[in-house]
Amino acid sequence: MAAGGIAARAMAARGGPSTADYLSGLNPEQRKAVETLDGPVLVLAGAGTGKTRVLTTRIAHILASGRAYPSQILAVTFTNKAAREMKERVGVLVGGAVEGMPWLGTFHSIGVKLLRRHAELAGLRSDFTILDTDDVVRLIKQIIQAEGLDDKRWPAKQFSGMIDGWKNKGLLPADIPEGDARAFANGKGRELYAAYQARLKTLNACDFGDLLLHPIAIFRAHPDLLREYHDRFRYILVDEYQDTNTAQYLWLRLLAQRPRSRRPTPTHEAAAGFADAGARFIPAGEAPIAVDQRVNICCVGDDDQSIYGWRGAEVDNILRFEKDFPGATVIKLERNYRSTAHILGAAAHLIAHNEGRLGKTLFTERTDPEDVKVKVHAAWDSEEEARAVGEEIEQLQRQKHPLNNMAILVRASFQMREFEDRFVTLGLNYRVIGGPRFYERQEIRDAMAYFRMVCQPADDLAFERIVNVPKRGLGDTTVRLIHDQARARDIPMFQIAGEMIETDEMKPKARKSLFDVVTMFRRWQGLLETTPHTELAEIILEESGYTDMWKADKSADAPGRLDNLKELIRSMESFESLRGFLEHVSLVMDAEQNENLDAVNIMTLHSAKGLEFDTVFLPGWEEGLFPHQRSLDEGGRAGLEEERRLAYVGLTRAKRRCHLWFVSNRRIHGLWQSTIPSRFLDELPEPHVEVAETDSSYGGYGRGGYGQSRFDTQDPFTNSYSTPGWKRAQANRTDATRTNWGNRSGVSVERVGYGESGPRARTIEGELIAKSAVDTPSRFAIGDRVFHMKFGNGTVAMIEGNKLTIDFDRAGQKRVLESFLEATA
DNA sequence: ACTAGAGTATTTTTT
DNA sequence: ATACTCTAGT
């Protein structure tokens, strides 16, 4: 049994007969969190206090002390990334691969596993399909239309959001509040939800919410089955507990709260006794019966980092833990190993403005000779902000700081663009984390729909998606005909299509096309068992004409799409079957990034959670953007507190240097608006923060029409909050409309017309080019054909260091970074 | 069946 | 402003 192997290795890995080495590096609190194995444990782990370390060490400890097999530990995370990391780190501790931990994964992946085992109890077959949001919206749209409702007035997207919300709360159609039900489509909300669920069942499909809800329903209806899992899962660990939603909470509670005294409780040996661990080693064979009626659940989280309330997370779950699990041990991890004292001081003071916290205060024992204060910078507008941040980054770069250790964390993704533009002109490498994801691209989803049809001919949504892609003359009329018949007879569309090509219901032309499609799919379905899956995938994309479609497409991104398709096939290699691959993709939506390139990281604050960087730039600290207006409008005080937690997350990402920015003017929905500094800036403690002097390096040129203002030379922000400048900023707060920081209200309007042709800074580039041209000869030569993600194909016209001027076939002449180019034949 | 033009929305994101 | 979606017209 593979599982035993790991436990055995864990045993072997523990070093000597004395304390295991994996425990030795822990501080007392961490150690307590690792060693308190009996009963419920809540670990309140502040940012940078070694949360993951505690979780992984705890697993290692459970294994090494022989208290459970790897297969008896349920460890849940939110993201695949977190799960992956946990697996790796447990592997390192335990000394080897962790293939023996079948129940370490995301809520959803574990949910799928449970549901595949017991699908029939939810009215599904075990080969059910998992629909992604796109499929769901299309399906709901059909249902809304089928009800005879106007899908304009009642957008499918909105309704899918509502369903999502209900499912997050663990509510089935019968459970939803009357008010909610009435709120949509003239009171048809409940009906529509029920119709949607029914339709999923006939499609043998699930949405993401169902992956949790079905297991909950199954466990509730089958206590005997639940008991089996109680016996199996001797230890439960939950990561990021503050992010759990109600459904996840219910799911956990079912698994964690075993009924009282099924059998008398034997004594609990002391957890710390490592030397006698061998004696307690569970003999191989059948799963041991639970000896402990207490719940060995350990939840790790940080209420101060709860930033997902808008998608159903209930901070209350973590606040309520001790009530849910009486007698719980609560351990606070407050010793921070990440940031300097100034950064921690700033973050702590900020977050203290929130009410209803469990109350932790981070501290560090580190004394840092280079402990600099958190810096607040002001800029005229977002362009200047980007320029100044670029300056700062170049300066750090000159001091040999790797770009990889720097990050720009924005509140909203539209802020990224200005930084990207700026970095392109500067020749700074950057990478955007998050953003549009690989598996959400059109070509990938189309290809996946083909594969789904081959594995699952009953997948109507896949059928509808690709039956006329590429164009085959099977338009709306034909598809609707098939669709209606399929629904009327409750039979998959593919089957109907198969029947229809035998009749003369359709026009000969359409019939021929449909015949071809059906024949193709039948052939591929026949090849499924005999042909290697990567090969089959290639065959499908070729024979269907799908690749040809993109080859014929002259638009700039067509070659990129073909590349993506190749990448898709390549990524299939590590799976043993097409089916396995489909399963993986439906749950894992991310694709890895190039970590080798030294580049500045740009991402949203949300996607920064869990990461750390030496230097962090936090632009856009203005009222309305951060805290975001919508958060305030929709969430009220709770919304504000969540924004504040987001600010806290941002600050605590920084290890050594943290720069905050706010601008006086920002373009919102195309209009320039004057803005005022974020209230969060006021909530920072003076001793740990300084207001930066204007960066003189960029002050004198390239500022469009603003050069004449004294604002440029006379910085209102000098060194502290008590300066006149800061006070002016404060004063402006009360009168935002008039503001514009002086008498410049007219100028911002002019700015609108500037666009690309406006005056731009050129000087900085010269230096940079000269510098980089020396050390790196270009991989391209003038006249080479190249491809660029954004601009498509082009010819190299000029090379200046790492920056090339390209004559693009479609986009005209642009200067771009070499690292964004690919050679084409 | 395809394209052009109008209309609309525009925080954050996982699975 | 801009990008995306949907409709209406060809």
Image (cartoon, coloured by chain):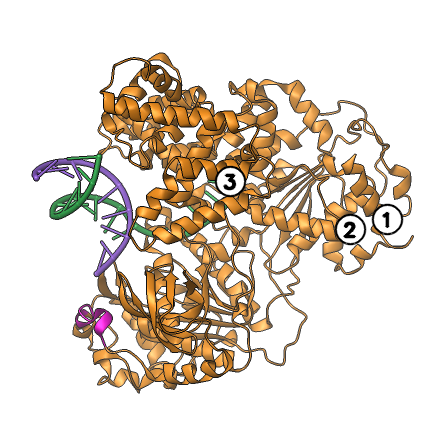
Chain colours: A orange, B green, C purple
Inspect the magenta stretch and tell me whether residue A753 lies in it: yes
Q: Which range of residues does the magenta coloring cover?
A: A749-758
Q: Secondary structure at mark 1?
A: helix
Q: Give the residue type that dot 1 points to.
A: Ala
Q: Chain of mark 2?
A: A
Write down the residue under mark 2.
A95
Q: Earlier in the sequence, mark 1 or mark 2?
A: 1
Residue A758 position (above or below residue A268): below
Res A231 quadrant in image: top right
Q: Which mark is residue A41?
A: none
Q: Which mark is residue A12?
A: 1
Q: Which residue is mark 3?
A: A585
Q: Sort mark 1 into few (<14), some (14-19) or many (20+) by Cα contacts within 10 Å.
A: few
Between residue A410 and residue A27, name the one nearer to us. Answer: A410
**Residue at horizontal 78 percent and vertical 32 percent from the top:** A292
Element under disc 3: helix
For label 2, count other residues whose C-alpha is less than 10 Å away and answer few (under 14), some (14-19) or many (20+).
many
Disc 1 to disc 2: CB gap under 8 Å: yes
